[in-house]
Each structure stands twice: as structure tokens, then as C-alpha cells.
């Protein structure tokens, strides 16, 4: 039974080590903010942070997370950078359907932690692979710039 550090709490989950983190979060821990999109690490809907790095939870086995800190969208607002990103998202109404947005927010937060004043090229690279079927990319870019300026 793996014991994981999720959102600052230790959770003992009765799951096999090879279970993808996404399903442990959603189906066992009840943290449904992380979304299933493609299941093969291509869309970014399942993005969470592991030790501060954005990772795709659909391909990350639970057994690989011993001693690591996992943060999901449910707790990203507790991080000052994450809170700025969420506020910027609300300020300019980024969300359309919203399905991909938890992954977008998680990727944007990791980007701004790594590059507090990102260029357009930095944003393109940091958000690469996070797909938005509604096409809110312009508003996502604008929100990242707002969050960066709000330090």
C-alpha cells in the first residue's frame, strides 16, 4: 500500500505500484480536479506537480513517487505563484469549456516558478503540449503575463 504526500497530507492508498497517479488521485483519493484527456501524456489535462515540476499523471506510476511531494489543482492556490495564476485566469475569463484548464493552470504555475518573467517563447515552450480544444491560447498567454507582472 503506497503512502503518498498529496497536497501536504500523507495518504495511504490501497493501489498497485503500477497504477497511474491520475487514477489514484481521481478514483481512490477523490481529487477529481485532475482530468483524464488522452491517457498517453499528449494533452496535458492530467498535469500535476511532483516536487514542483509539472508532470503528466496519466503516465506516472504511483510506485515512482515515494518520498515525493504531489500537488494537484485542489491545492495550487496555496502556493503564491499558483494563486496569482488562478487570479489572472479569473481576471480575464480564460476558461471556455474548462476541461483542460486545471492542467493549463498547473503548467503555467510551474512555468512561472522556473521563469518569473517569461518571454513569449518561454510561454510557448512551457505550455507546449497542453491542448485546449476551445482555443483559449491567446487568453492563456495573456493570463500568464498578468500573473508574472503581479509579483
Image (cartoon, rainbow, N blue to C red):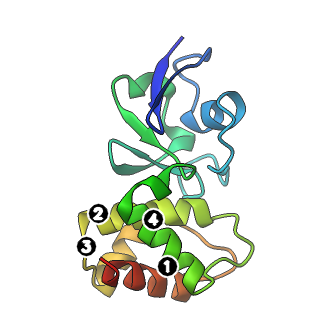
Q: Earlier in the sequence, mark 4 or mark 2?
A: 4
Residue 19 location, x and y as percent? 58, 26
Q: Earlier in the sequence, mark 2 or mark 1?
A: 1
Figure check: 147 above or below 59: below
In the rendered image, is residue 118 in sight?
A: yes
State the mark number for residue 88: 1
- Give how far apart the Cα atoms at labels 2 and 1 are: 15 Å
How many labels sit on residues? 4
Figure check: 133 above or below 129: below
Identify the residue position indicated by label 4 in the image.
Answer: 83
State the mark number for residue 113: 2
Q: Taking 123 as reference, is 100 left or right?
A: right
State the mark number for residue 116: 3
Is label 1 in a helix, a strand or a loop? helix
- Give how far apart the Cα atoms at labels 1 and 3 are: 14 Å
The answer to which of 82 and 41 lies nearer the viewer is 82
State the mark number for residue 150: none
Whether the residues at callouts 2 and 3 have beta carbons within 8 Å, the answer is yes
Q: Taking 74 as reference, is 70 left or right?
A: left
Q: Can you name the residue that lies furthest to the top here?
A: 1
Q: Earlier in the sequence, mark 4 or mark 3?
A: 4
Q: Can you name the residue that lies furthest to the right here?
A: 97
Residue 142 location, x and y as percent? 46, 88
Q: Earlier in the sequence, mark 1 or mark 4?
A: 4
Amino acid at each position: 500500500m503506497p503512502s503518498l504526500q498529496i497536497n501536504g497530507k500523507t495518504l495511504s492508498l490501497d493501489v498497485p505500484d503500477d497504477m497511474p497517479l491520475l487514477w489514484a488521485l481521481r478514483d481512490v483519493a477523490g481529487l477529481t480536479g485532475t482530468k483524464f484527456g488522452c491517457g498517453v501524456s499528449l494533452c496535458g489535462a492530467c498535469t500535476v506537480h511532483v516536487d514542483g515540476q509539472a508532470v503528466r499523471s496519466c503516465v506516472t506510476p504511483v510506485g515512482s513517487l515515494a518520498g515525493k511531494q504531489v500537488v494537484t489543482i485542489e491545492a495550487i492556490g496555496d502556493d503564491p505563484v499558483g494563486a496569482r495564476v488562478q487570479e489572472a485566469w479569473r481576471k480575464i475569463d480564460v476558461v471556455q469549456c474548462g476541461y483542460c484548464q486545471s492542467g493549463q493552470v498547473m503548467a503555467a504555475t510551474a512555468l512561472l516558478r522556473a521563469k518569473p518573467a517569461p518571454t513569449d517563447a518561454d510561454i510557448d515552450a512551457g505550455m507546449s503540449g497542453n491542448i485546449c480544444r476551445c482555443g483559449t491560447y491567446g487568453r492563456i498567454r495573456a493570463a500568464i503575463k498578468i500573473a508574472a507582472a503581479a509579483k
